Amino acid sequence: MNANLFSRLFDGLADPAKLAIETEDGGRISYGDLIARAGRIANVLLARGVKIGDRVAAQTEKSVEALVLYLATVRMGAVYLPLNTAYTLNELDYFLTDAEPSLLVCDPARRDGLAAIAAKVGATVETLGADGQGSLTDAAATASPGFETVARAGDDLAAILYTSGTTGRSKGAMLSHDNLASNSLTLVKHWRFTDQDVLIHALPIYHTHGLFVASNVTLFARASMIFLPKFDAERIIALMSRATVLMGVPTFYTRLLQSPLLTRQTTGPMRLFISGSAPLLADTHREWAARTGHAVLERYGMTETNMNTSNPYDGVRLPGSVGPALPGVDARVVDAERGVELPRGEIGMIEVKGPNVFKGYWRMPEKTNAEFRHDGYFITGDLGKIDDNGYVYILGRGKDLVITGGFNVYPKEVESEIDALPGVVESAVIGVPHADLGEGVTAVVVRDKGASVDEAGVLNALQCQLAKFKMPKRVIFVDDLPRNTMGKVQKNLLRETYAGLYAK
């Protein structure tokens, strides 16, 4: 049996005419069309000299053709390397020099800027614009749709995704065909996907969430997706009348809640709302349930592991929790220094093990060894706890831990108390250098427009809720928290901004 992800996705297709993708302008692409398009692109890649195991890098806007490029790359045995469209030329220089792709596909407007970088690593450059047009599709128009899927072993590489690199160099997470297939098939079953489902796909496709979770799960289930170029609250609400599932980041849900069009009636046809990539505030979870009658299903994953845990489809979806470990995945919480598993309810480092966990970091064997325990568990870098029912709670990144006066402060614990205060939208708690304490607990808060909550009010409210060492030394109000493209708060930027706060 061919373990190639493409073969697993499409071999045995019963109905080539089944709808796979609907575009915003009403275009309809069947499963048979998708396979043929992937064949054409695979033949172009072959003609451009791409060989089995070569990296194909892509910095392109979201389009059906960009998704086909991913499928074609995997089909012909190469390794797909998606790159965030926000990356600068300086950042791209690092990624391309490190990964050494044989082919780079980019937006036509960026070709000139990237040509010199591509030349350094001997990469051919093709273009693909947001409209699905470019030199790549021009060549594909005359290529044959027939292509024999290259045989791959389950352990062979299918993709490399670079981590966000908030500290140190970005690392290329190596994901195998087995990693991607096993996780997607688990999610199809866990989230009850069928060929009758219609996913509203409004996520970017350079990231695990939009590329591997949303796209692969839909295709494995023989379901269909409405492929939107970006998030548009009113458009998404309008599409709910003929869709069944939405996958999004927390920002999707907070913005949808701002629309008066979001009601129990408009969300009635939907069966499932999934949130991930960043923590969903418990208040958002409760407000969504009150407005729509649906409980958001929150899950937890990483670039290196795809999905690790998920709240249940049937059963309690706990606000603030990312649910139990998925079938086939083991999760534990350990003392970060000793690696010893901690009792239920105690806070420590989350570690996971399973067929979803990546092979290691590209060309970084020492870093790979440092991130795995001897018994095969991957050290996620996330702090959390597991309750008596097996539900996992994420309390922040290990690097976000604040050590003040010798005491450990877990930011999520303080943030949860602040977020529950009237007039507060959300907060981020960070550690800032402090001459006396080492780090001063500092809260950066976004408040409702017109809210009267101030620093003294926050501190007074927290006095009865938190131990003295956990209390913020300062509360700073801002209009918005800095986020990356997937909605995660960039605490590293906040630490840089307020680094001198206690230096006076």
Image (tube, grey):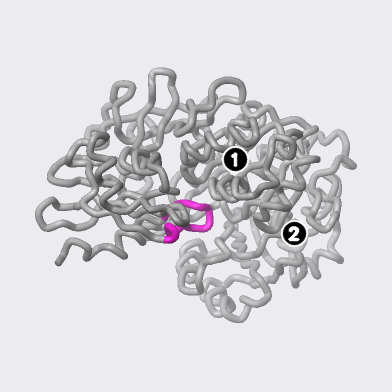
Regarding mark 1 in the picture, which secondary structure is present there? helix
Where on the picture, by quarter, is residue 39? bottom right
Q: Position of residue 493 (x, y in %)?
A: 36, 61
Local packing at callout 2 (Cα closer than 10 Å; few below 14, some 14-19, many 20+) is many
Whether 423 is drawn above or below 502: the answer is: above
Taking the spot 75% from the left edge, 30% from the top edge, the residue there is 194
What's the residue type where badge 2 is placed?
Glu
Q: Position of residue 58 (x, y in %)?
A: 62, 63
Can you say which quadrant of the picture contains the N terminus?
top right
Taking the spot 85% from the left edge, 46% from the top edge, the residue there is 30
In depth, the one of 234 and 454 nearer the eye is: 454
Give the residue at mark 2.
Answer: 65
Regarding mark 2 in the picture, which secondary structure is present there? helix
Where on the picture, by quarter, is residue 382? top left
Taking the spot 47% from the left edge, 41% from the top edge, the residue there is 281
What's the residue type where badge 1 is placed?
Leu
Q: Is residue 286 magenta?
A: no
Give the residue at mark 1.
Answer: 180
Which residue range is magenta in the image?
Answer: 479-489
Q: Is residue 486 magenta?
A: yes
Residue 477 appearing in the image: yes
Taking the spot 75% from the left edge, 42% from the top edge, the residue there is 240
